[in-house]
Amino acid sequence: MMLPENEVRQRAEYCYLVFLQLSRLRENMQATPERYLDYLKRSTLRLAEDAFIRAIVEEELRMGSPDGGLRYLIPLYEGFAHAYCEVLQIPLEEIRDGIPQDFREKLAAEMDRKLRKSRKKQA
C-alpha cells in the first residue's frame, strides 16, 4: 500500500531535520560522544527518546567509536530524506525550503549551546 503524498512529505521533512540536527551536533566542538545523548535530550524532535538513535549511539560508545555513531546516522537520515524526495519527485532543497528557517535555526541552536556542568551552576 502506497503512503499518501502528504505523509511521504512529512517523513522527508522529519528525516531532513534529523539529518540537520545530528550534523550540527557533530560540528559542535564542545560536544563529546559521551555527552551526545545529553545534547539530544534538548531536541525538539525528541531524538534522545528515539529508540533507534539511542541504541546506535549507546552501542557505538560501548564499542569505543570516536564519533558515537554519527558517522552512520547522519548519512542514513540524509539518505532517507533523499529517498522520500525521489518518491515525491522533488529536490531535497524543496523540502528544506518548505520548513520555516526560524525552526531550522532553532533545531540547529539546540545542538550548539554548551551543556551545563553537572552538579555545578553556571553564572
Image (cartoon, helix red, strand yellow):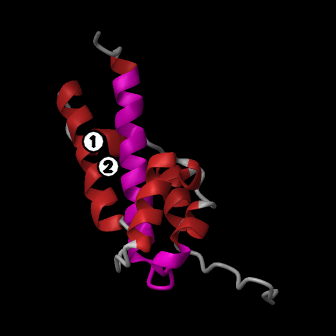
Q: Is residue 45 visible?
A: no
Q: Residues within 10 Å of mark 1 (few under 14, many from 20)?
A: some
The image quadrant where one finds the N terminus is top left
Please say if 66 is above or below 68: below
Circle 2: element type:
helix
Image quarter for residue 84? top left
What residue sits 34% from the left and 36% below the top? 12
Location of residue 95 in the rendering, given as x and y in whole percent from the top left corner:
33, 39
Please say if 108 is above or below 102: below
Proximity of marks 2 and 1: CB atoms separated by less than 8 Å: yes
Image quarter for residue 23? bottom left
- 99 and 81: which one is in front? 81
Location of residue 21 in the rendering, given as x and y in whole percent from the top left corner:
45, 59
Residue 16 among those drawn in magenta: yes
What residue sits 71% from the left and 85% below the top? 117
- What is the number of the mark on residue 80? 1
Q: Residues within 10 Å of mark 2 (few under 14, many from 20)?
A: many
What residue sits 37% from the left and 73% below the top? 63
- What is the number of the mark on residue 77? 2
The stretch in magenta equals 7-35
Seen in the image, is 47 located left or right of residue 24? right
* Badge 2 amino acid: Tyr
Circle 1: element type:
helix
Location of residue 107 in the rendering, given as x and y in whole percent from the top left corner:
52, 57
Please say if 80 is above or below 22: above
Q: CA distance from mark 2 to mark 1?
A: 5 Å
* Badge 1 amino acid: Phe
